[in-house]
């Protein structure tokens, strides 16, 4: 298990290693857009990983290509539906958009 802290609410959830950050966010009853349901095509699940970047999988080609098309992307940017927990470090992330 890995502890994931979700900002700006500060909610925490113990998530299973191998699960996506999107699954962790939803398990914490936090709201996040995920319009393509995890296919890396919509970019609405864009988040910032604030702490614990070594506890998250590396960016794959599809994720990288989608991030390249999003405004406001920075070095902490990930797609929550593509980034999975490695279990090596707890993670703090920031949800950027929600309805
Ligand atoms: S849910 Fe669409 S890119 Fe993540």
Image: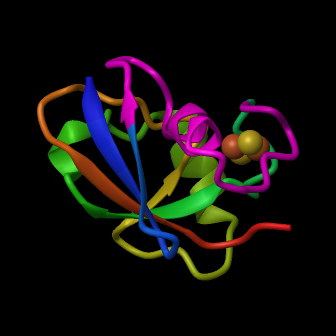
Q: Where residue 14 sits: x, y (%)?
A: 35, 33
Q: Residue placed at 70% from the left, 38% from the top? A: 40
* Residue 18 is a magenta residue: yes
Q: Nearer the viewer, residue 11 or 31?
A: 11
Q: Is residue 88 magenta?
A: no
Asked whether 63 or 91 is in front, the reply is: 91
Residue 24 on image: x %, y %: 51, 37
Side (left or right) of 46 relative to 61: right
Q: Quadrant of residue 51?
A: bottom left
User: How far across and down, in percent of the image, does residue 56 sit?
Assistant: 29, 38
When asked about the image quadrant of residue 46, the answer is bottom right
Q: Is residue 92 left or right of residue 73?
A: left
User: Which image quarter has ligand 1?
Assistant: top right
The region drawn magenta spans: 14-38
Query: Magenta stretch: dominant SS?
Result: loop
Figure check: 3 above or below 5: above
Q: Residue at x 43, y 76 (%)?
A: 74
Q: State the residue at coordinates (20%, 26%).
A: 87
């Amino acid at each position: 298990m890995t502890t994931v802290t979700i900002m700006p609410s500060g909610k925490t959830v113990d998530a299973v290693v191998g699960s996506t950050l999107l699954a962790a966010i939803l398990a914490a009853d936090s709201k996040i857009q995920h319009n393509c349901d995890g296919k890396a095509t919509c970019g609405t699940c864009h988040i910032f990983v604030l702490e614990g970047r070594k506890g998250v999988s590396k960016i794959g080609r599809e994720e990288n290509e989608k991030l390249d098309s999003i405004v406001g992307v920075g070095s902490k940017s990930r797609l929550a539906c593509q980034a999975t927990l490695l279990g090596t470090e707890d993670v703090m992330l920031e949800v950027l958009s929600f309805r």
